[in-house]
Image (spheres, rainbow, N blue to C red):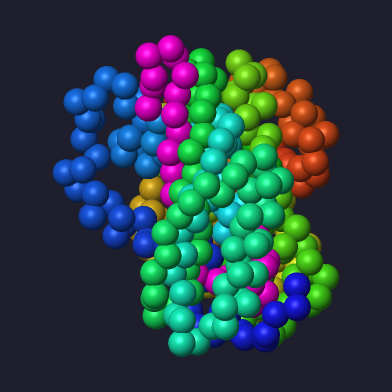
């Protein structure tokens, strides 16, 4: 789109899902709030840090509600809008639902951004919503010191198709649907060392809707789903392990990565959120003694609009993986397994 040139990332102290509060801070804020609620129809609330809230209606239909917003991860306003919208809608897919409408959340520093740029952000979000088959039915906007954009999204599913992050079973296989390294790429972008091809790769993965979640929820082999976003792969795996009361093993050699993620990580292009993530949940993770820092940084790398982490019956895993790759998620890989044991995550070389 033909809009004035303003470096959006220069207006924000952080970007994308790297803006999220560290897991340890969030846990402190929610002390006393994550207790089971006295509402029988609230099927999913704060208890397990799941991706969205779920309310059961009288006919067995469930309403899924979520919100997600952040500051720019890229400078192009249209791309920023697309990434933020894709990321927000993902929460509904991660619960096994189908989105039905969205509301826009907009915070703009009016003295710093021309209206043409704001329109481009909104247009990017609307384009993704159109691709998901839903309207942007309203929203709310305020004047803020830094640009912020995202969505509140409503979806539905049948109760039998609801998938939480807390229902993994011993013996399950773990599948990841998108490659890691978005935070690494965003750090390189801010330092102007990300190539044009790298930027295109980053946009392609962050604007790929996680629609496969809706289909996976109809498969009885699929037990648990969560999307991998700001807490990194390890953080969301820890949430799944704790919620399911299981031990998860992730095989580092099998992880799908963006093409230049390893090279850039070795060069030290990491986000501050990566270190905050590790400081928050490292006690629940066992790493190989010789695992290099760059590899740990990929495991804790905040993923903006990342893929789905799926726990499914081992005997059905290859069929599940095939259906995912055939649906357009070519980087999907089987990356580990769940087993009985204390709730923690072990990384194998």
Residue 122, relative to residue 11: is it above or below?
A: above
How far from the left and from the top, in percent, is residue 296? 55, 61
In the figure, is residue 233 to the left or right of 255? left
In the rendered image, residue 127 lying in the magenta stretch gets the answer no
In the rendered image, residue 82 lying in the magenta stretch gets the answer yes
How far from the left and from the top, in percent, is residue 313? 61, 21
Q: Residue at position x 61%, y 84% from top?
A: 7
Name which quarter of the figure residue 166 lies in: top left
Q: Nearer the viewer, residue 183 or 196?
A: 196
In the figure, is residue 58 to the left or right of 265? left
Q: Residue at position x 49%, y 44% from top?
A: 153
How far from the left and from the top, in percent, is residue 169? 50, 23
Q: Residue at position x 78%, y 66% from top?
A: 200
Residue 188, relative to residue 282: is it above or below?
A: below
Q: Nearer the viewer, residue 138 or 327?
A: 138
- Can residue 289 be seen here? The reply is no
Q: Residue furthest left?
A: 32
- Can residue 28 be seen here? The reply is yes
User: How many labels were placed on the picture?
Assistant: 0
Q: Which residues are magenta?
A: 55-83
Q: Nearer the viewer, residue 346 or 190?
A: 190
How far from the left and from the top, in percent, is residue 288? 54, 53
Q: Residue at position x 68%, y 18% from top?
A: 315
Quarter of the picture containing the N terminus is bottom right
């Amino acid at each position: 789109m033909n809009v004035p040139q303003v470096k959006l990332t220069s207006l924000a102290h952080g970007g994308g899902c790297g803006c999220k509060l560290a897991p340890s801070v969030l846990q402190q804020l929610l002390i006393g709030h994550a207790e089971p609620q006295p509402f029988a129809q609230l099927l999913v609330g704060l208890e397990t840090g799941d991706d969205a809230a779920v309310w059961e209606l009288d006919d067995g239909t469930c309403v899924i509600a979520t919100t997600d917003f952040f500051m720019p991860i890229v400078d192009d306003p249209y791309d920023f809008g697309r990434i933020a919208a894709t990321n927000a809608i993902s929460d509904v897919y991660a619960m096994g639902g189908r989105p039905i409408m969205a509301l826009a959340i907009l915070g703009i520093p009016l003295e710093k951004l021309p209206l043409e740029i704001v329109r481009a952000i909104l247009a990017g979000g609307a384009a993704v919503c159109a691709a998901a088959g839903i309207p942007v039915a309203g929203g709310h906007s305020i004047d803020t010191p830094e640009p912020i954009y995202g969505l509140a999204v409503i979806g539905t599913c049948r109760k039998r198709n609801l998938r939480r992050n807390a229902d993994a079973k011993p013996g399950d296989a773990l599948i990841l649907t998108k490659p890691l390294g978005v935070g690494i790429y965003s750090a390189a972008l801010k330092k102007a060392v990300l190539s044009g091809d790298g930027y295109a790769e980053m946009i392609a993965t962050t604007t790929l809707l996680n629609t496969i979640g809706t289909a996976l929820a109809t498969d009885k082999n699929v037990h648990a789903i969560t999307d991998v976003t700001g807490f990194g792969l390890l953080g969301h795996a820890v949430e799944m392990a704790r919620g399911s009361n299981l031990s998860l093993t992730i095989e580092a050699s099998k992880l799908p990565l963006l093409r230049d993620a390893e090279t850039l990580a070795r060069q030290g292009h990491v986000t501050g959120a990566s270190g905050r993530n590790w400081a928050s949940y490292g006690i629940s993770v066992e790493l190989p003694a010789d695992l290099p820092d760059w590899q740990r940084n990929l495991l804790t790398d905040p993923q903006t609009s990342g893929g789905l982490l799926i726990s499914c019956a081992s005997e059905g895993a290859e069929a599940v993986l095939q259906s995912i790759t055939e649906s357009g998620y070519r980087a999907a890989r089987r990356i580990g397994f769940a087993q009985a044991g204390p709730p923690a995550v072990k990384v194998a070389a």
